[in-house]
Image: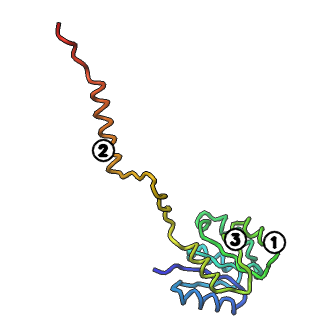
Amino acid sequence: MPHKVLAVDDNIDTILILSAVLEREGYEVITAKDGLEAVEKVERDLPALVLLDLMMPKMNGFEVCRAIRGNPKTSHIPILMLTAKTDPFSREQGLALGANEYLTKPLNPKEILTKVREHLLPTEPPPPPPGALTVSLTGVIALIGELIRTWAAFLAPRSSPAK
């Protein structure tokens, strides 16, 4: 089942580009043209990731980000802000509100795909470093059994030598 991505932007050209790029890579894309519609679709459709513009009608991207992060049902969803706002204050504000990434326009499809993939990869623990001690459950059970036998032998009543 493909990951569902919500693309939010009031510019139809941006929506069309994002949709084409993501669908070509196998993602299911849903769209919203303003912040209010975005919040409704996030709650209803629970996308795996949100691509979010900042400057939109009804509700700006900062407000949408705050709403997503403030809802326990949606707070885990990665948010990638895509915006024409390049000033450091906007970037800091977006990240402080909980955006996972802050990408600036013009759109770079390769960068967007890279970031989308990074945030949608399954999270697995890293492999142990070379030479690290690895313990199997079977080994742990055997060790516990040996400890029990040792303690049982130690605590067993001892017979006193015959006189």
Locate residue 84 relative to residue 49 in the image: left or right: right
Instruction: Out of 56 and 90, give the one closest to the viewer.
Output: 90
Residue in front for this viewpoint, 83 or 12: 83
Q: Amino acid at mark 1?
A: Pro
Looking at the rendered structure, the kind of residue marked 3 is Cys
User: From the image, which quarter does the C terminus lie in?
Assistant: top left
Residue where numbered disc 3 is placed:
65
Q: What residue sits 64% from the left and 81% below the top?
A: 111
Task: Rate crowding at label 3 as few (under 14), some (14 to 19) or many (20 or more) other CA atoms within 10 Å.
Answer: many
- Circle 1 SS class: helix
Q: Quadrant of residue 107?
A: bottom right
Disc 1 versus disc 2: nearer the observer: 2
**Residue to which mark 2 is pinned:** 142
Secondary structure state at the residue bearing disc 3? helix
Gap in angstroms between the C-alphas marked 3 and 2: 51 Å
> Is residue 15 found left or right of 27 in the rendered image?
right
Q: Which mark is residue 88?
A: 1
User: Residue at the spot x=58%, y=72% of the render?
Assistant: 119
Viewer-nearest of labels 3 and 2?
Answer: 2
Q: Residue 158 occupies which quadrant of the picture?
A: top left
- The mark closer to the camera, 1 or 3, is 1
- Near mark 1 (Cα within 10 A), the count class, few <14, some 14-19 or many ≥20, is few
Residue situated in front as seen by the camera: 134 or 130:
130
Q: Quadrant of the N terminus?
A: bottom left
**Relative to 54, is 13 above or below?**
below
- Please give the name of the residue rendered at 66% of the width and 66% of the height, measured from the top-left corner: 69
Distance between the alpha carbons at the discs numbered 1 and 3? 18 Å
Compared across the picture, whether 56 is left or right of 161 comes to right
- Residue neighbourhood size for the residue with mark 2, other residues' Cα within 10 Å, grouped as few (<14), some (14–19), many (≥20): few
Amino acid identity at mark 2: Ala
